[in-house]
Image (cartoon, grey):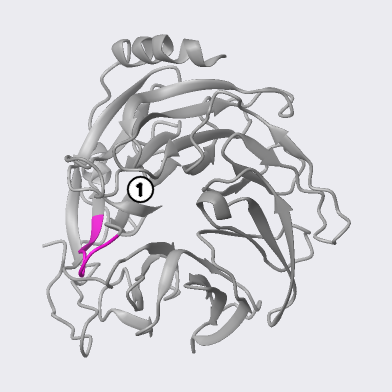
């Protein structure tokens, strides 16, 4: 497909889209005044109860863990300066989850449960993914900066939890990063805007990471990247949104993986035009109908309203309908079943400002589908991360 086709295809897609039944979402204010400038969010089961917890880190200081079971918000590091990405992972293989963090000018990891800090590299970065690239049983890292400095992928091979070997791969400047098994050979490859990088299962200096261009129609370099099998053909597809430059206009599209992923992929627009501040994009089966839907959010540096929304997939990715959940915006959200009721929720906070609220958008699909509430409605105690971390004793789902 070429760029001249995208407008027509989008019109056909949206005009012909059957109206999916909206899934009800309830807003939960997890923290009315979260970390200052809450740039980074992640999720993972830090408490060991089988339910993902939420983590938020602020550029103005504080890395905070919000247990989904309620109780006190847990400070992990106060008074620091953090950047835009972090991941929960088992770094040291001791069965306690750890946290890999991009701080300002440093890549580091926190050893759970004591949260001892271990530096990895002194480098300015924006995007982060964890994966066992060389299949040796421990996690490795890939990271990227943004803008003109986003012209390299930084790979970190773990020789031990305190010894990491760095190498870089030159790529076109930009922003955005994901991992997926694009070529279906059993290892994780790297995906950025317009190209994917083939994993040779080695992070040695001489190992060749071949780069394959999948799109020449996508020209916006600052992107949010998501992956998933949109058309249910068994292949990993790519979804892109424009993530930076308030006032700009572009589109959200998915790219269909062909049988040979080294060939060009067809672009299928989901929504156009959209403002170029969609600093969140993710895939998930939000309505439990067997296909992947697309969640997106505009951060609040753009024109109002700043939509938090879900695009409902008709089944093959050919048609889409949009449900707006909120008009107040969000940034780098997390998709997880935070309340343990079997459906997917969204959590996040706007990207900048004094103590933006940390919010959970709780799916009520369990009620909608089953006719009764199967989740634990006592989860997610309202928290405040400031001061002495009091327990307010108020359930957020009341």
Residue 232 in sight in this render? no
Quadrant position of the C terminus in the picture: bottom left
**397 displayed left or right of 36:** left
Residue for point 27% across, 45% down: 366
Q: Position of residue 19 (x, y in %)?
A: 25, 20
State whether residue 364 is above or below residue 72: above
Residue underneath mark 1 = 344
Does the magenta portion include 381?
no
Task: Tell me if mark 1 has few (under 14), some (14-19) or many (20+) residues whose alpha carbon lies within 10 angstroms of its own.
Answer: many
Q: Position of residue 213 (x, y in %)?
A: 68, 31
Which of the 4 image quarters holds residue 381?
A: bottom left
Quadrant position of the N terminus in the picture: top right
Q: Nearer the viewer, residue 196 or 293?
A: 196
Magenta extent:
352-360
Q: Main secondary structure of the magenta part?
A: loop
State whether residue 246 is above or below residue 137: above
Does the magenta portion include 355?
yes
**203 displayed left or right of 325:** right
**352 displayed left or right of 118:** left
């Amino acid at each position: 497909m070429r760029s001249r086709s995208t407008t027509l295809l989008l019109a056909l897609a949206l005009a012909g889209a059957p109206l999916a039944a909206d899934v009800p979402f309830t807003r939960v204010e997890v923290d009315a005044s979260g970390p200052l400038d809450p740039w980074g969010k992640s999720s993972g089961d830090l408490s060991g109860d089988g339910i993902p917890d939420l983590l938020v880190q602020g550029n103005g200081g504080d890395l905070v863990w919000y247990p989904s079971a309620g109780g006190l918000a847990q400070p992990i590091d106060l008074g620091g300066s953090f950047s835009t990405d972090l991941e929960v992972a088992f770094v040291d293989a001791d069965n306690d989850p750890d946290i890999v963090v991009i701080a300002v000018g440093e890549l580091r990891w926190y050893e759970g449960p004591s949260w001892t800090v271990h530096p990895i590299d002194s480098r300015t970065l924006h995007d982060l993914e964890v994966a066992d690239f060389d299949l040796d049983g421990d996690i490795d890292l890939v990271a990227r900066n943004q803008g003109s400095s986003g012209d390299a992928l930084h790979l970190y091979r773990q020789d031990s939890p305190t010894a990491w070997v760095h190498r870089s791969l030159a790529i076109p400047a930009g922003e955005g990063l994901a991992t997926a098994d694009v070529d279906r050979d059993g290892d994780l490859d790297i995906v950025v805007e317009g190209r994917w990088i083939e994993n040779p299962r080695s992070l040695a200096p001489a190992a060749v990471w071949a780069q394959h261009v999948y799109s020449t129609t996508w020209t916006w370099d600052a992107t949010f990247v998501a992956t998933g099998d949109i058309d249910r053909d068994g292949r990993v597809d790519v979804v892109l949104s424009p993530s930076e430059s308030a006032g700009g206009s572009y589109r959200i599209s998915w790219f269909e993986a062909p049988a040979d992923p080294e060939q060009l992929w067809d672009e299928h627009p989901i929504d156009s035009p959209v403002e170029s501040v969609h600093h969140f994009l993710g895939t998930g089966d939000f309505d439990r109908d067997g296909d992947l839907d697309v969640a997106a959010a505009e951060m609040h540096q753009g024109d109002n309203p700043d939509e938090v929304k879900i695009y409902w997939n008709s089944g093959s990715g050919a048609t889409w309908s949009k449900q707006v959940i909120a008009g107040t915006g969000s940034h780098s959200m997390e998709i997880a079943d935070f309340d343990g009721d079997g459906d997917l929720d969204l959590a996040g906070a706007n990207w900048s400002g004094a103590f933006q609220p940390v919010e959970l958008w709780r799916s009520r699909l369990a009620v909608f589908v089953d006719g009764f509430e199967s989740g634990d409605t006592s989860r997610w105690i309202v928290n405040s991360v400031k001061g002495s971390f009091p327990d307010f004793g108020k359930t957020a789902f009341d």
